[in-house]
Amino acid sequence: MKNETDARLRARAARVIPGGMYGHQSVTKLPAGFPQFFAKAEGTYLWDSDGNKYLDFMCGYGPNLFGYGRPEIDAAFTQQAKRIDTATGPSEVMVELAEKFTRQIMHADWAMFCKNGTDATSMALMIARAYRGRKKILLAKGAYHGSAPWCTPMPAGTVPDDRNHFIYYSYNDVNSLELAIDEAGDDLAGVFASPFKHDVIVDQEMPSPDYARRARDLCDKNDALLIIDDVRAGFRLTRDSSWSSLSIAPDLSCWGKSIANGHPISALLGSEKAKEAAGQIYATGSFWFSAAPMAASIATLKLIEETDYLERTIELAEEMRSGLTEISQRHNVPLNQTGPAQMPLITIPDAEGKADLEKGYAFSSEMIRRGVYFHPWHNMFMNAAMTKDDISQTLDAADASLAAVKDTIVAKP
């Protein structure tokens, strides 16, 4: 597999980009054989800067819901951009998109738009505090809500004061949640909850109905806002907010990633209860009113509403999960597959059942060599452009990859 162009780009980047790269795609966080730079994306495939082709199970870390370059969505973006995109003020398409979100998402009575998931979660934080003038916010330990100083997982450049008034609880642990609520007392502003526990490296967990109901009940009892951070999971579990399957309606929900199939936009949706507080905060950006991504989002929401994308994606995901289980058992190499099948975290456990990063790097590196982009420690994503042939290719690659590293993996304690 060629990597000469990628190596040259890395060397150039090291001179002009701090660390050579930053964020989740940092060169220090992925195995050496993983490509850093890409030249083309189409459907469910990526081509790196050297022309190597990969079946992509990261989907741009989530935005690719219907396939890279989905024609209807990109056409809506292009047509709108020809009329008006980023200008002095918004286009009527902003109102159309807000109306469409409030029709499709049951709890939503209003919508605000921004660019990144961090924008949406930060606005939710501000609204929760503005709602009753309180300060305390509950967060699940290890949960990711963005890269602002109040929530970044990497503390460099932040100070302890950035996290004043946060109280941490254990996801899915009702007792832990109740203790955190008690600690907040009459200063409780809101509770952040992920749609499911999708922390990196550790096994994923779906929310228990008791935990979800208790979170809703405690927010109601204390007149605080329940916030669901659907930035990563939105429209991948249901066509509504992710806790709708548990009959739990949040007061605020944060969206990003897939709502425009890769075009730059995110959203905060809210109930009537939180509308007045939402109107009190100041949050904006020069590109937050850009019309072309909003048109792309309308086209995406139409496909979400009218196609069987979700059912087909889940069917293929379950087929892959079953196939990987069979291959794992046949090679006598354990694979932990946790979380929803369409958003899997796939790791190789150590003797204590925890993710063994060395083994995971070895396995994912072999998958990369066979043209399948698996991530060694982050949850992955399926998309609606995937086919049964893609799943067959993935299972063939996994079979060969486990065979290639089996002796090393089994021998390592």
Image: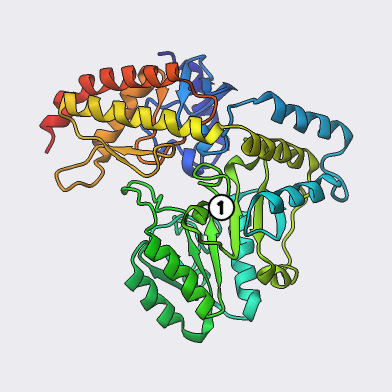
Q: Nearer the viewer, residue 208 or 147?
A: 208
| Residue that appears at 22% across and 28% down | 328
Q: Residue 391 appears in which quarter of the rendering?
A: top left
Residue 325: x %, y % from top left: 26, 30
Residue 58 shows in the view = no
Give the side of residue 109 with respect to residue 118, left or right: right
Dot 1: few (<14), some (14–19), or many (≥20) neighbours within 10 Å? Answer: many
Mark 1 residue element: loop
Task: Specify the quadrant that holds the N terminus.
Answer: top left
Q: Residue 260 appears in which quarter of the rendering?
A: top right
| Residue that appears at 39% across and 51% down | 199
Image height of 60 relative to 46, above or below: below
Tell me the kind of residue under disc 1.
Answer: Ser
Task: Identify residue for label 1.
Answer: 241
Task: Specify the quadrant that holds the C terminus.
Answer: top left
Residue farthest along the bottom direction in this orientation: 186
Give the side of residue 293 with respect to residue 368, left or right: right
Image height of 409 relative to 95, above or below: above
Q: Residue 279 appears in which quarter of the rendering?
A: bottom right
Residue 392: x %, y % from top left: 37, 18
Image height of 248 relative to 398, above or below: below
Residue 73 shows in the view = yes
Chosen colour scheme: rainbow
